[in-house]
Amino acid sequence: MGRLTTHVLDTAQGKPGAGIPLTVLRLEGERRRQVAAAMTNADGRVDRPLLDGEAFTSGIYEIVFAVGEYFARTGAVVPNPPFVGDVVLRFGIADATTHYHVPLLVSPWSYSTYRGS
């Protein structure tokens, strides 16, 4: 069964990104519709798939990670406004029968992602 999962790694501090709120949006033409919301756990992961079953379909999605709030809370020295605030990752799901894992590696100054396993 296909599903969408994620995790966050704080590369500046070398630890999981715990307590980061995130939302999942599905793009439908010009419209962006929220289809899920979650918070990362102590391991930087979400306790359940963001989407699975009938809710997981082919299309264009975004995950919005509120990392600016996270860095402010952890005491990182960041400017106001932060250089990296909300990270928006847009990606396509071509085959909704497979597992899509979308990790975020983030610091107050940069971020990267990839299709994980």
Image (cartoon, grey):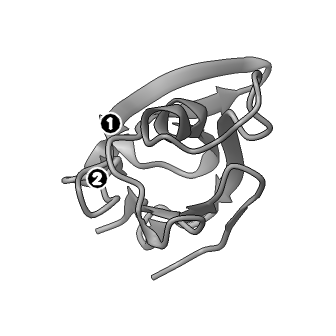
Of 105 and 92, nearer the camera is 105
Residue at 76% over, 57% down: 110
Residue 94 drawn at (x, y percent): 63, 63
- Residue 74's place in the image compared with 11, above or below, is above
Please name the residue that numbered disc 2 is placed on. 46
Picture mark count: 2
- Residue 48's place in the image compared with 55, above or below, is below
Of 115 and 29, nearer the camera is 115
Q: Quadrant of residue 17?
A: bottom left
Residue at 27% over, 64% down: 43
- Residue 92's place in the image compared with 33, above or below, is below
Q: Which mark is residue 67?
A: none
Residue 115 drawn at (x, y percent): 60, 74
Residue at 70% over, 17% down: 31
> The C terminus lies in which quarter of the figure?
bottom left
Q: Is 41 left, or right, of 21 in this rendering?
A: left
Q: Are marks 1 and 2 in contact (CB under 8 Å)?
A: yes
> The N terminus lies in which quarter of the figure?
bottom left
Q: Amino acid at mark 1?
A: Ala
Residue at 43% over, 60% down: 6
**Dot 1 lies on which element?**
strand
Q: Amino acid at mark 2?
A: Val
- Residue 85's place in the image compared with 46, above or below, is above
Please name the residue that numbered disc 1 is placed on. 38
Neighbour tally class for label 2: few under 14, some 14-19, many 20 plus, Cα within 10 Å: many
**Dot 2 lies on which element?**
loop
